[in-house]
Amino acid sequence: MLVAVMYGLWNRPGENEQPVPAPTQTESPDQPTRVESEIVTEDPADQPDAITHVDLGNQEWTFRLRDEEYVLPFIDGQYADNGQYHWSLDDEMTVYSDANQDGYLDAATVVSKYSIGGNGWERFVVLWRWNPQTQQAEIIPDVVGYFVRCYGTLDSLQAVKGGFRFSGIVVPDDSVDSSCAQPRGEHYSRTVAIDGLDPIRIDATSGWGGICGRGIGDAGVGQMVSDVADEFKVAARTSAPDITLKVDHFGQANGHPIDKAAGHYYRGDYVLIYYYPHDVDFEHLGETPCGWAKLKPGEPRG
């Protein structure tokens, strides 16, 4: 199977209208003079672009790839992890879009992990949403893109209407160059949005926006997902949007893009599966969309 590197990206007045001049007012000696405390100023945190004023480089980042959780207390966008790894926030790649359609901008950015004293590296595409109730930026726990030296590249990250699009190259196992200098693979593009605290895909295939992982079996070929699952969702919760495609070709995914030995990926009663909404050369490309199936009572796990 191929490495499942996830895709990823993103009132003006009429011409004949003239501005209405503000009325002039002369304060008389009998009128009180307006004091500064009476002047109402808007709180920047209440503005649609509030998240753009948040210093993400001085936040604690907690995110996960499958079940592996990372806690990064960034200071000025940098963090050293026990002398083994150096983490860095790629500020120049941070972009903003209203990814959950609530009227406030959200953020997508890139975190890089480098081996100290070596040449290994990993890159994570991470989303943040603005919560207008708490007036805080909140990280989306599941990363939406993962790239590792030799197995793929992240070439661009863009804000698009309703979300973020990122693109690059995904490298099949049998195409990895021994020097890893020039990855040979297929170009990809993935577009994601936010639903609650879950990433979702909003490109042609829809589905979960997190890391789908390696396919580990095609037991569902010729079988409807509804035969084995009560629900098929873009996230592992009943309130998440349904995946309504009539899928008759699916299989379970392990949720890890590199580890061939990783098993099925469960969250509560849900198991992660990949599906084929159209013809996909999975063996060559190594990526296909996935979603969460809530197993019927009695369906085997594992």
Image: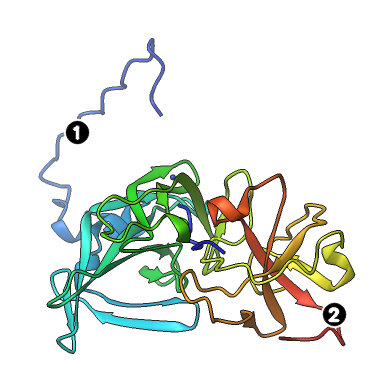
In which quadrant of the rendered view does residue 126 lie?
bottom left
- Looking at the rendered structure, the kind of residue marked 1 is Gln
Q: Taking 93 as reference, is 85 above or below it?
A: below
Q: As rendered, which of 51 and 220 lies closer to the eye?
A: 220
In which quadrant of the rendered view does residue 243 lie?
bottom right
Q: Which numbered disc covers residue 25? A: 1
Q: As rendered, which of 177 and 155 lies closer to the eye?
A: 177
Q: Quadrant of the N terminus?
A: bottom right
Horizontal side of 195 relative to 72 (left or right) equals right
Q: Secondary structure at mark 1?
A: loop
Give the percent coordinates (x, y) of residue 183. Answer: 34, 51
Q: Secondary structure at mark 2?
A: loop
Which residue is most to the top?
A: 16
Q: Quadrant of the C terminus?
A: bottom right
| Badge 2 density bin: few <14, some 14–19, many ≥20, Cα 10 Å | some
- Looking at the rendered structure, the kind of residue marked 2 is Lys
Give the percent coordinates (x, y) of residue 263. Answer: 60, 82
Give the percent coordinates (x, y) of residue 142. Answer: 47, 71
Please name the residue shown 38% across and 60% down the image.
151
Please name the residue shown 87% across and 87% down the image.
298
Please name the residue shown 39% across and 70% down the image.
138
In which quadrant of the rendered view does residue 113 lie?
bottom left
Horizontal side of 65 relative to 196 (left or right) equals left
Q: As rendered, which of 2 and 97 lies closer to the eye?
A: 2
Among the two numbered marks 1 and 2 on one chain, the one whose residue lies closer to the N terminus: 1
Marker count (numbered): 2
Q: Taking 129 as reference, is 18 above or below it?
A: above
Observer able to see residue 240: no
Q: Which residue is mark 2?
A: 296
Q: Taking 297 as reference, is 15 above or below it?
A: above
Please name the residue shown 82% across and 53% down the image.
246
